Image: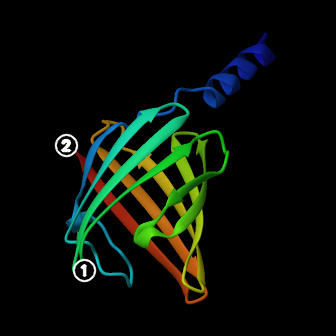
Amino acid sequence: MRLVTIALIAASTVFAAAPDLSGTWKLNASKSSFGQFPAPEAMTQKVTHAEPKVKLETTMTTQQGDVNFTSNYTTDGKESTNQGFGGSETKSTAKWDGNTLLVETKGSFGDNTFTMKDKWTVSEGGKVLTIDRTFSSQMGDVSQKMVFDKQ
């Protein structure tokens, strides 16, 4: 009986419902850090999440002007192709690790290839989305932390 109870607890942990990422999320610049990259003047992400699909509509205001792009992912680990920042093509995979969404994206800017590894977490109250990012390229690694408040 004890073994059955342990197995049920383990199974419920594995199959627990993923957090709902849906909503409009506004960057909280004072709680975010962009490493050696300049922070955007403003950034909003609209997330539409219907498991296993995640649609991300990003709007940013930068020193170079406004930038808008849309990314689509599936949380089942299948590869997704999107247009990245600057119009370059990216390939991403996304999967759940407990309540954390792991998104790995590969792409290039000109001759420079890069890999971004994101960890998305939502606070227990569902009001804060944090994306911890490691950006790796031939020029080295940069760590970023983007904190978004739900609108």
Q: In this rendered view, identify the residue nearer to me: 6 or 56.
A: 56
Q: Position of residue 10 (x, y in %)?
A: 69, 27
Q: Residues within 10 Å of mark 2 (few under 14, many from 20)?
A: few
Q: In this rendered view, identify the residue nearer to me: 150 or 70.
A: 70
* CA gap, disc 1 and disc 2: 26 Å
**Number of numbered discs on residues:** 2
Q: In this rendered view, identify the residue nearer to me: 68 or 148.
A: 68
Q: Which mark is residue 151?
A: 2
Q: Is residue 112 left or right of residue 132?
A: right
Q: Is residue 107 left or right of residue 128?
A: right
| Relative vertical location of residue 62 with respect to residue 45 in this rendering, above or below | below
Mark 1 lies on a secondary structure that is: loop
Q: Classify residue 63 by image quadrant.
A: bottom left
Q: Residue at x 38, y 66 (%)?
A: 145
Q: Is residue 47 left or right of residue 132?
A: left
Residue annotated with mark 1: 64
Q: Residues within 10 Å of mark 1 (few under 14, many from 20)?
A: few
If the image is split into quadrants, where does the C terminus sit? top left
* Residue 16 seen in render: yes
Q: Residue at x 52, y 74 (%)?
A: 135
